[in-house]
Image (cartoon, rainbow, N blue to C red):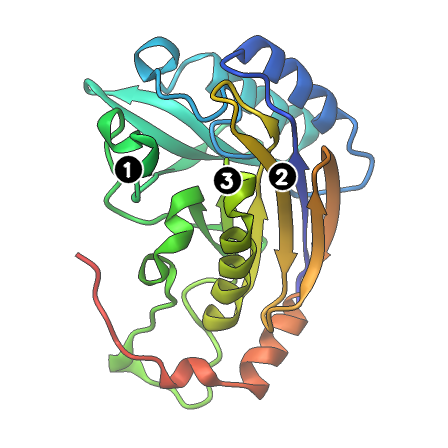
């Protein structure tokens, strides 16, 4: 069974300052000494959680995408995090899954944070992205999506039920975020819940520090195993942390505790 090594970067982002954030994150990525395969950055990693897309949005051939291509190629990693993207006159909070060869996939955040007026500036995505790496299937989501369990729920083809199968839709669920400290109990609790109910690894990557709206972020980035056990947690400080996920543990949990077979079928529209 193949393992997957991931690196979480929890930075103190510079508010609406792309150049400074590229410099900050470049140093952190270049400073990774362990061999790693996927590097995860927070939501809107080049600007912070900005509601000025008309000022900071880029096309898919903009500076931020080019920076991601350069970093992924130089470190031979998959690099992921979200950016402000403009397309066909609309703005998206778009997560990019950048491969070392410059190819990429993307996911537009579905659940826009109306409490922070995100829905007034950005357009919602309509479909999920299940990426892959070394045979791992990876569900990629953004911040506020965490509060909506159906959007992350494992699905299976009930017309092809196999009593011996332990394969589900995905193995790892990643959330990139700018989640405020004053609601960090929800962040930590829901990350564990998503792992338990979907019998998968869950990774949440958040920022630290105060943003331009005087909102403080405690980080609380986490790695959680398929039983809900916390494997890593860091609060109130910048951090770069590398960890190897074990596929054998995932398969053992699903085989020993096949709760997924009792799940209700559903459809998302």
Quarter of the N terminus within the rendering: bottom right
Secondary structure at badge 2 equals strand
Q: Nearer the viewer, residue 240 or 4?
A: 240
Q: Nearer the viewer, residue 226 or 170?
A: 226
Q: Left or right: where does residue 259 sit relative to residue 31?
A: left
Few, some or many residues within 10 Å of mark 1 (<14, 14–19, 20+): few
| Residue plotted at (48% across, 63% down) | 194
How far apart marks 3 and 1 lie (CA) works out to 14 Å
Q: Residue at x 41, y 90 (%)?
A: 163
Element at label 1:
helix
Please tell me the numbered disc located at residue 114: 1
Is 58 located above or below residue 107 in the figure? above
Return the residue at label 3: 179
Badge 2 crowding class, 10 Å Cα cut-off, few under 14, some 14 to 19, many 20 or more, is: many
Residue in front for this viewpoint, 164 or 182: 182
Quadrant in the picture for residue 78 = top right
- Disc 2 marks which residue? 218
Q: Position of residue 67 (x, y in %)?
A: 55, 18
**Residue 26 is drawn in which quadrant?**
top right
In the rendered image, residue 52, in percent from the top left (x then y), is placed at 35, 15
Q: CA distance from mark 2 to mark 1?
A: 21 Å
């Amino acid at each position: 069974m193949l393992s997957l090594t991931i690196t979480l970067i929890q930075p103190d982002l510079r508010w609406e300052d792309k150049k400074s954030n590229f410099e900050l994150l470049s140093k952190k990525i270049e400073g990774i000494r362990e061999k790693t395969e996927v590097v995860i950055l927070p939501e809107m990693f080049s600007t912070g959680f900005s509601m000025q897309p008309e000022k900071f949005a880029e096309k898919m051939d903009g500076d931020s995408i080019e920076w991601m291509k350069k970093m992924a190629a130089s470190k031979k990693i998959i690099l992921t995090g979200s950016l402000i993207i403009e397309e066909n006159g609309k703005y998206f909070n778009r997560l990019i899954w950048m491969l070392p060869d410059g190819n990429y996939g993307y996911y537009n955040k579905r659940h826009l944070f109306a409490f922070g007026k995100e829905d007034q500036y950005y357009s919602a995505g309509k479909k999920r992205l299940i990426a892959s790496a070394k045979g791992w299937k990876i569900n990629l989501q953004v911040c506020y999506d965490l509060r909506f369990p159906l959007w992350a729920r494992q699905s299976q083809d009930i017309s092809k039920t196999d009593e011996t199968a332990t394969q589900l839709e995905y193995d790892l669920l990643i959330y990139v975020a700018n989640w405020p400290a004053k609601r960090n109990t929800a962040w930590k609790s829901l990350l564990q819940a998503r792992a338990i109910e979907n019998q998968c690894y869950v990774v949440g990557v958040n920022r630290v520090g105060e943003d331009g709206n005087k909102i403080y972020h405690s980080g609380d980035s986490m790695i959680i195993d398929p039983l809900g056990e916390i494997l890593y947690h860091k609060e109130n400080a910048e951090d770069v942390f590398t960890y190897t996920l074990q596929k054998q543990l995932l398969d053992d949990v699903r085989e020993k505790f096949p709760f997924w077979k009792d799940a209700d079928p559903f459809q998302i529209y």
